[in-house]
Image (cartoon, rainbow, N blue to C red):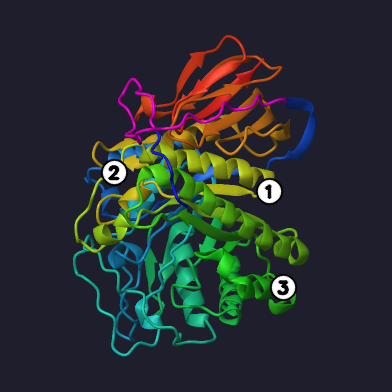
Amino acid sequence: MRIHHWISVLAVSLGAIPLLANAQQLPAAPAVRVDWAKTVSVSRATPTLQVVVNPQLLRGAKLHDGSFAALKLLGADYVRYVPWLPYPRQAVAELDPPTKERTSWDFQYIDPTLDDFMQATAGHSVMLNFSTMPAWMWKTDKPVTYPADPNQVFWGYTQGTEIVDPTYKQAADYYVRLLSWYTKGGLTDENGKWHASGHHYKVAYWELLNEVESEHHWTPEEYTKFFDVVTEAMRKVQPDLKFVAIAASAPREDGPMWEYFLNPKNHKPGSTVDFISYHFYATPPKGEPIAAMQYTFFDQADGFLTGVRFIEQIKHRMMPDTKSDLNELGVILPTDDDSNQGRGSVPEPEGYWNLASALYAHLYIKLAQLGIDVVGESQLVGYPTQYPSVSMMDYNTAQPNARFWTLKLLHDNFGPGDKLVANTSPGNNMTAQAFVTPRGKKILVLNRRAVAQTFKLGTNTAKSVTYVAPSTGDNPPATKAVGGKEIELEPFEVAVIDVQ
């Protein structure tokens, strides 16, 4: 998209977003009129997040205390926990193949972070995903080595596209032992030896693998068979465990996977799919200024939402009882590539965190309208060398940033069972949806642009506005009393309006 004018924004109390000179003022937003008596749909959407394991979540690390305190404060359900491939010692519990003499089961670098996670989410449902299988379960030209240092990033662990055991019993045994370790107090290894863990956690959901079309390049047929074999084995350990499948990285490009996996005829009798999951990150081109990102992010979101409709139509046709968890939603800046490879990091542009938080609020509205069950923001902790632009924590101060506080704002005001009621559209520069909630009538509205805008309430009167904006910085949402029907939104502000 060609940007014709640099846009200027008003300075706010904690500083100003850098804007573009010679701006044209955006046209005044139309009044948003709400028909509170006309229910359009009932929300199923739970706002939540994912926690990806990395060294900054280890005890003693700079971001550890603040991150787990924020997670506890949030109090969300369906929190996704992912020990992942860049740190094999923190993600894989059996790094070497078993022999008759010994096994390599080792949780010393895995358990402390998971224990802290389970304590921070106590009383809420969690979704575990040990997404990285042991490399020795895959055929490779030579054995895959890994760093001795558990904190050393290593992007080459996931290799191979042909599994050693195509019956998937070996993989099923691995996941059965992981589940037993965390829910049954320990595991019995391949040689019949019991290893005690002392863990008796309640795990409600288990997601099998991550981004299957890119990690090991699973075909629909292979993954479907894998899913059936592994879930059948794990349910023998915990019959009420529910499973999440696919975690697609490019869901719009993988029609054959959806068509095959969601067809019950392709599954073993008795196999059930509780959730499917898939992902979206806005990805602006390298060098694009934030003045253009404000258009790119939402344009790409519109494309993703078209894919959501496509996938959900297939699901409702073939597996109507299966739920949908969109558990990685966010933005990845192209500069993260260099950062992840240790080629240096650059700070995110001013205003970026508020723009990214507005994108999540926009997706929450649209996905609630589409009947999605779980709307998961990605991710709690990122930092230079580990996707810094995806973080919900300020990796310099170890405090939650605007993305976290926007999630908290949504979590505290909206959830399943809310009624989405009819309202007029505020146009292309803002997104708004009115809800009738157990806590009263509310309008969720966000400013998609880097310029202050006025939002008119039509026939309603606001009691108060709770908001995340440039002026709130890395602080919790602020609340202001409002008299009348006109509300000014800061650039990229996300606001919940309590209506009389």
Span highlighted in magenta in the image: 8-33
Residue contact between numbered discs 3 and 2, judged by CB atoms under 8 Å: no
Q: Where is mark 2, residue-wise? A: 64
Q: Is residue 28 magenta?
A: yes
Which label sits in the foreground, 3 or 2? 3
Q: Quadrant of residue 91?
A: bottom left
In terms of depth relative to the viewer, which is nearer, 216 or 452?
452
Secondary structure beneath dot 1 equals loop
Q: CA distance from mark 3 to mark 1?
A: 21 Å
Image vertical order of residue 446 relative to residue 79, above or below: above
Q: Residue pushed farthest right?
A: 37
> What is the distance, in whole Å, between disc 3 and disc 2 at their CAs?
42 Å
Residue 317 on image: x %, y %: 77, 64
Q: Which residue is mark 1?
A: 370
Bin the neighbour count of mark 1 within 10 Å (Cα to Cα): few under 14, some 14-19, many 20 and up: some
Residue 92 quadrant: bottom left
